[in-house]
Image: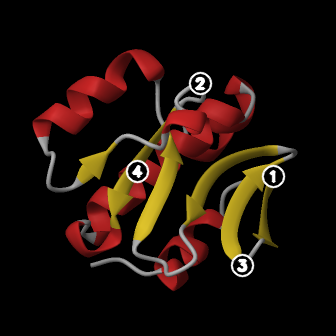
Amino acid sequence: MITVEQVRALALTLPRTSEHLIRDRVKFRVGAIVYVAFSRDETVMGFAFPKEERAALVASEPAKFHLPGESDMRFNWVHAWTSALDEPEMRELVVEAWRMVVPKKVAAARLGL
């Protein structure tokens, strides 16, 4: 199980990230683009993920991942149950979501690519 505190500890080390509390929901974003957000009760972590790959991710582990609500299907977004994620997996999901929203040169500098 992962927590908001674990995600915060990672996300705030990623360049250009800021944390916001919007309608009682913790969100991490770069500029105006949210790349990780939690449900109000912190049982669900939403994260940026390529649209063309999300059906395969959900199908691969349906007890862990699920699609967002109908109104959010237009975004590059997937949800995961926080109780089903471990820290290494969370780290990978958060970093990859962040990479989707920052310039390639910023990601390359941070990740040593």
Give the Cα separation between the discs numbered 4 and 3: 18 Å
Q: Residue at x 42, y 66 (%)?
A: 44
Q: Is residue 9 above or below residue 34?
A: below
Q: Residue at x 63, y 46 (%)?
A: 110
Image x and y of residue 5, in percent: 53, 84
Name the disc covering residue 16, or none. Answer: 1
User: Could you classify mark 2 by the number of other residues whose Cα lies within 10 Å: few (under 14), some (14-19), or many (20 or more)?
Assistant: few
Q: Secondary structure at mark 3?
A: loop
Tell which of 109 and 59 is nearer to you.
59
Image x and y of residue 16, in percent: 81, 52
Image x and y of residue 17, in percent: 76, 57
Give the Cα separation between the discs numbered 2 and 3: 23 Å
Q: Identify the residue position indicated by label 4 in the image.
A: 79
Give the amino acid type for the residue marked by disc 3 in the picture: Asp
Q: Secondary structure at mark 1?
A: loop
Residue 19 visible somewhere in the drawing: yes
Q: Is residue 79 above or below residue 43?
A: above
Q: Are marks 4 and 1 in contact (CB under 8 Å)?
A: no
Q: Secondary structure at mark 2?
A: loop
User: Could you classify mark 4 by the number of other residues whose Cα lies within 10 Å: few (under 14), some (14-19), or many (20 or more)?
Assistant: many
Name the disc covering residue 74, or none. Answer: 2
Q: Which circle's residue, 4 or 2, is located before the other in the chain?
A: 2
Q: Which circle's residue, 4 or 3, is located before the other in the chain?
A: 3
Q: Is residue 78 above or below residue 44?
A: above
Q: Which circle's residue, 2 or 3, is located before the other in the chain?
A: 3
Q: Identify the residue position indicated by label 3 in the image.
A: 24
Q: Residue at x 67, y 72 (%)?
A: 25
Q: Residue furthest top?
A: 52
Q: How is the image coloured?
A: secondary structure
